[in-house]
Image (cartoon, rainbow, N blue to C red):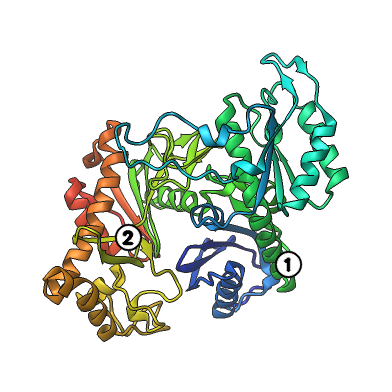
């Protein structure tokens, strides 16, 4: 393919298991795709592997790339896996427990076994300093700069990696926060500082503080990742600049993403909803249920009249990531626009196992890309949804990942027999079917939650499945919900 005068747009989506690359010829509208395994240790490697594969497969000159956009789950995974940076919090004296107190509300009010999410910053690293601003912005207690300097020295001793600053009513008067940032720059210039008045200049103390803290713990982790990817793109001759999908379905520059990674917490899932809406609209459908089943999770959303629903607040790190439709108290609130969606731990790599009561269940643990499902032959020995589909003949073992790799049916059978069938008293095929039925039931329940429980009749919508496992599960899920049409994209 000659590309002397062509211009391409390139999109890269990094999931927990696979990395997908899409090239769009701006002149002809032709869409080219490539898929590679994600590299969990450094997802930027998987991104470049996918880009290299796409360019080489179609003979495209890197210099012809006019626009690059990236969707990723690195931010949300960092929170969920507890791998955020060690951070400190400076707030008003007497309010250091704001993260511990959080909301009074909880998902189940009478659940005596409810565990409140562990604060992202422990109490000993939450420090109060004398300062108070009133609700109209007037100074009630001036900032005690000596206390700020003492806290700065304490943070240096504790080797924190970043500092969040969230003072009362800073959205009305940001000057005290800015002065704290100046002092911190003098005392510990190597520490990045995040101000609530910059990240979330809105009232409601706890969610504003939580948003600032989420951004702070992400900053030292996500920023370097984006910088590495930028460097690798430039080294390969792709000089279009890097953009990232935001949680709202929009696009932000790499510089903004490096400073405010909280904006891209739901980057990858948001991109999936936008893609589903686009495909459906091209087919004449504008009301749809988007179902993206990847290797690790399933993401679900409702699209009305071609527009995804947008919420102003959601909780990251929750068992069901949603917006105003979800009950509070499951995760960490974030005040930033987000496509309203639900995310559950049911994907192609979700592990089937017996719960403490002896019942067979699926997820939320995932085999991921390494070692992956048992059938990959990479050391995984626990059965997954992919193994079940393979055993039942729904996947061609000789043509996986576009024919680039093969799957081992025997390993899949052994994993299901050892960890699911025999412990549950089932035959091989019964266990494989049970694994699929259980995963489907979780997705049906989630779709019911975002549709029927919100006053939406799913029978009036078309189901648009995507992701590696989406089309395989879609028909059974649609049947259970009474959805009459399933629209499968050409390259789901």
Residue 447 versus residue 159 in the image, above or below: above
Residue at (38, 34) in percent of width and height: 106
> CB under 8 Å between callouts 1 and 2?
no
Q: What element carries label 2?
A: strand
Q: How many numbered marks, from 0 up?
A: 2
**In this view of the protein, can residue 224 be seen by the observer?**
yes
Considering depth in this image, is 489 or 181 the residue closer to the camera?
A: 181
Binning the other alpha carbons within 10 Å of mark 2 as few (below 14), some (14 to 19) or many (20 upward) gives many
Which quadrant is the N terminus positioned in?
A: bottom right
The residue at which mark 2 appears reads as 363
Dividing the picture into quarters, in which one does residue 302 lie?
A: top left
Residue at (66, 15) in percent of width and height: 135
The percent coordinates of residue 155 (x first, y second) are 74, 47
Considering depth in this image, is 393 or 154 the residue closer to the camera?
A: 154
Q: Would residue 347 be found to the left or right of residue 152 on screen?
A: left
The percent coordinates of residue 111 (x first, y second) are 30, 37
Residue at (30, 82) in percent of width and height: 397
Considering depth in this image, is 304 or 117 the residue closer to the camera?
A: 117
Q: Residue 217 carries which label?
A: none
The residue at which mark 1 appears reads as 231
**In the rendered structure, which disc, 1 or 2, sits on the residue that comes first in sequence?**
1
The percent coordinates of residue 6 (x first, y second) are 64, 67
Q: What element carries label 1?
A: helix
Residue 22 versus residue 148 in the image, above or below: below
Nearest to the eye among marks 1 and 2: give it: 2
Considering depth in this image, is 169 or 448 the residue closer to the camera?
A: 169
Distance from disc 1 to disc 2, alpha carbons, whole Å, reads 36 Å
Which quadrant is the C terminus positioned in?
A: bottom left
Q: Would residue 192 be found to the left or right of residue 209 on screen?
A: right
Q: Would residue 131 be found to the left or right of residue 122 on screen?
A: right
Binning the other alpha carbons within 10 Å of mark 1 as few (below 14), some (14 to 19) or many (20 upward) gives few
């Amino acid at each position: 393919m000659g590309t002397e005068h062509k211009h391409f747009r390139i999109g890269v989506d990094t999931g927990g298991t696979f990395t997908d690359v899409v090239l769009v010829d701006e002149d002809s509208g032709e869409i080219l795709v490539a898929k590679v395994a994600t590299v969990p240790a450094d997802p930027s490697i998987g991104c470049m592997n996918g880009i290299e594969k796409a360019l080489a497969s179609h003979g495209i000159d890197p210099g012809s790339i006019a626009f690059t956009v990236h969707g990723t789950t690195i931010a949300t995974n960092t929170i969920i896996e507890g791998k955020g940076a060690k951070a400190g919090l400076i707030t008003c004296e007497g309010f250091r427990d704001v993260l511990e107190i959080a909301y009074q509300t909880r998902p189940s009010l009478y659940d005596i076994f409810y565990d409140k999410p562990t604060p992202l910053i422990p109490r000993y690293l939450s420090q109060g300093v004398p300062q108070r601003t009133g609700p109209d912005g007037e100074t009630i207690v001036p900032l005690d700069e000596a206390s700020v300097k003492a806290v700065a020295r304490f943070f240096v001793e504790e080797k924190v990696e970043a500092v969040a600053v969230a003072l009362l009513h800073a959205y009305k008067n940001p000057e005290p926060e800015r002065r704290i940032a100046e002092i911190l720059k003098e005392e510990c210039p190597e520490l990045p500082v995040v101000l609530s008045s910059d990240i979330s200049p809105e009232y409601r103390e706890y969610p504003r503080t939580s948003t600032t803290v989420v951004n702070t713990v992400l900053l030292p982790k996500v920023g370097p990742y984006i910088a590495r990817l930028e460097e690798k793109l430039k080294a390969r001759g792709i000089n279009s600049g890097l953009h990232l999908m935001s949680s709202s379905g929009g696009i932000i520059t790499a510089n903004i993403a490096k400073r405010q990674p909280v904006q891209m917490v739901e980057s990858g899932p948001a991109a999936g909803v936008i893609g589903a809406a686009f495909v459906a609209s091209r087919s004449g459908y504008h009301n749809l249920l988007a179902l993206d089943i990847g290797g690790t999770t399933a993401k679900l959303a409702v699209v009305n009249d071609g527009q995804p629903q947008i919420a102003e607040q959601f909780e990251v790190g929750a068992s069901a990531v949603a917006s105003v439709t979800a009950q509070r108290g499951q995760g960490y609130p974030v005040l930033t626009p987000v496509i309203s969606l639900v995310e559950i731990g049911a994907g192609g790599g979700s592990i089937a196992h017996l719960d403490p009561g002896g019942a067979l269940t699926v997820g939320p643990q995932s085999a991921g890309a390494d070692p992956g499902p048992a059938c990959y032959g990479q050391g995984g020995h626990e059965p997954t949804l992919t193994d079940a589909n393979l055993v039942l003949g729904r996947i061609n073992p000789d043509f996986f990942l576009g024919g680039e790799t093969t799957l081992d049916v025997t390993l899949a059978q052994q994993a299901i027999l050892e960890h699911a069938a025999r412990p549950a008293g089932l035959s091989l095929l019964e266990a494989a079917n049970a694994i699929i039925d259980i995963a489907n039931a979780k997705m049906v329940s989630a779709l019911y939650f975002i549709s029927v429980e919100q006053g939406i009749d799913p029978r009036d919508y078309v189901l648009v499945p995507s992701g590696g496992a989406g089309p395989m599960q879609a028909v059974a899920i649609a049947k259970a919900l009474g959805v009459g049409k399933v629209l499968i994209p050409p390259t789901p």
